Amino acid sequence: MTIGERIALKRREQGLSQEALGESLGVTRQSISKWEGDMTLPEIDKLITLSRLFNVSVGWLLGEERRENARSETGEEETAGEETESVPPPEELSEEQLRMVEEIVGRYLAAQPRPLSARQRRGLGLAAALVVLCFAAGFFSLSGQIKEMKEDNQYLRQAISEVNYSVSGQINGITRRVEEAFEDQTDLFTRCDAVKSAVDYRGGTVTFRVYALPKFYETGMSVTFLADNGRDTVKAVGSPSPSGMFEAPLICVLTDDISVYAVLQRSDGTEERQLLAQFCDLYSDTVPEVQLRSDGSGLMEASLSDGVLTVPEQLVMAIRGAAAFGPEAKIKAVQAGLFKNRHLVEWCEPTEVPEEYTGAAEDWLFFRMRERSVLLEPGDAVCYALVITDEYNRVTVWYGDLYNYESFQDREKGLPVSQQPVPADWEEYVFMEDWNLTKEFLERSPGYRF
């Protein structure tokens, strides 16, 4: 089991969504999704926080207890008077730990915005190994204390807490020093940044003011700025000032994940690239918020038999909110539908406030989904989704809990149906084109108009 799978397992056991876990850790839902998909590794301080939140050891999250579990499964036990080595000495790393060091360094290098020299890779590898060695030493020391103090639970817990905080502080300090030293050596510019200067809501674009001052200026040097929004890449050539600063306006399509880079071209034609800034949720934070709700049953009451999913008639509800940041965009239309693999199965019909609803109806929208049968195969996923059109004619899709073929198979086995984690490749699907919808089709479809 990978680190990501272990995090996802414990999150689901505690009934937490990716967004709720992200709020507890101070990171975004996208970060949690990338951890669980093994696309990135959590920072060490986040691993320690996760271990406390999930009530497991850091070693379990890292997979370091697999060796101990394997020994237990084979039936080996310590005999009286025998000393059994449960972990290698702190100064030596096992093959499994070496593999972990290589994996951490490899993933860190792969995430770098530009190629590193062999010298830099060796330096980074040694730095990462130092961090892991310090952590391993602290962890192995902790294991020894647990063995010696297991007779007294009260003192044991206190010691564990003290060691955890001590190790966390040491690792954070080392990590910061490594990052600062590495950035100082690899930065191409003395000053550089990308600042959001304007947003064209109707045109769906964002303008950045970008600038960069090279550390060492030479005649013939140029700087080109790039913006990658996950869909395409735009560029702008920087204009040099007498001080050697290169500046330019950079305009790109507004999305939720934009990375801005500066490409330095030297007089000999060689190029190097550096990340200036990353912007998350720029698009989502400018659209009106409408949250999907249901009467409590949702798709959990649907049943699967011989590949046919029967969805009972049910009430689907949504509540209107406001944009998280910036000026609030007014809602023009809201539609709700049942989707399979991001393809529309059937629209829900708008309805008046139902008699069975006794709460406050202000800002609530009510839809009725009739009973419907859907063919479902392994790998298929179904969900309810809201399609929101704002005053700038921007269309955004927000989906609810996701259920796949395996979810409903659990019911046939007598198990409760449970929602599934959103696949990593679904994270960016918020535009109508990703859900196989067009504005012309939406204009002919049922929904609320304002």
Image: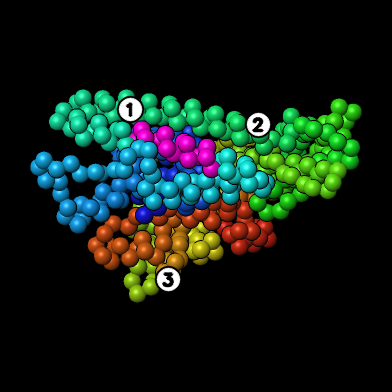
Label 1: few (<14), some (14–19) or many (≥20) C-alpha neighbours in 10 Å? some
Find disc 3 in the rendering and name its residue. 377
Question: What's the CA distance linking mark 3 and mark 2?
Answer: 53 Å
Q: Is residue 420 above or below residue 147?
A: below
**280 above or below 181?**
below
- Report the magenta residues as a range: 125-139
- Which mark identifies residue 93? none
Residue 133 colored magenta?
Answer: yes
The answer to whether residue 57 is left or right of residue 280 is left
Residue 108: image x %, image y %?
A: 55, 45
Q: Residue at x 45, y 31 (%)?
A: 171
Q: Which residue is mark 1?
A: 163
| In this view, 71 is above or below 382 | above
Residue placed most toward the observer, 85 or 260 = 85
Seen as rendered, the residue at the extreme bottom is: 306
* Residue occupying the point 83% across, 33% down: 217
**Front-most of residues 14 and 183:** 183
Whether the magenta-drawn stretch holds residue 272 is answered as no
Mark 3 and mark 1 in contact? Answer it, CB < 8 Å: no
Mark 2 neighbour class, 10 Å CA radius: few under 14, some 14 to 19, many 20 or more: few
Numbered disc 1: secondary structure = helix
Q: Position of residue 312 (x, y in %)?
A: 37, 62
Residue 184 is tagged as 2
Q: Secondary structure at mark 3?
A: loop
Q: Main secondary structure of the magenta part?
A: helix
Query: In the rendering, at what x and y percent does residue 106 appear?
Result: 53, 49
Left of 367 or right of it: where is 298? left
Q: Amino acid at mark 3?
A: Glu
| Between discs 1 and 2, the one toward the N terminus | 1
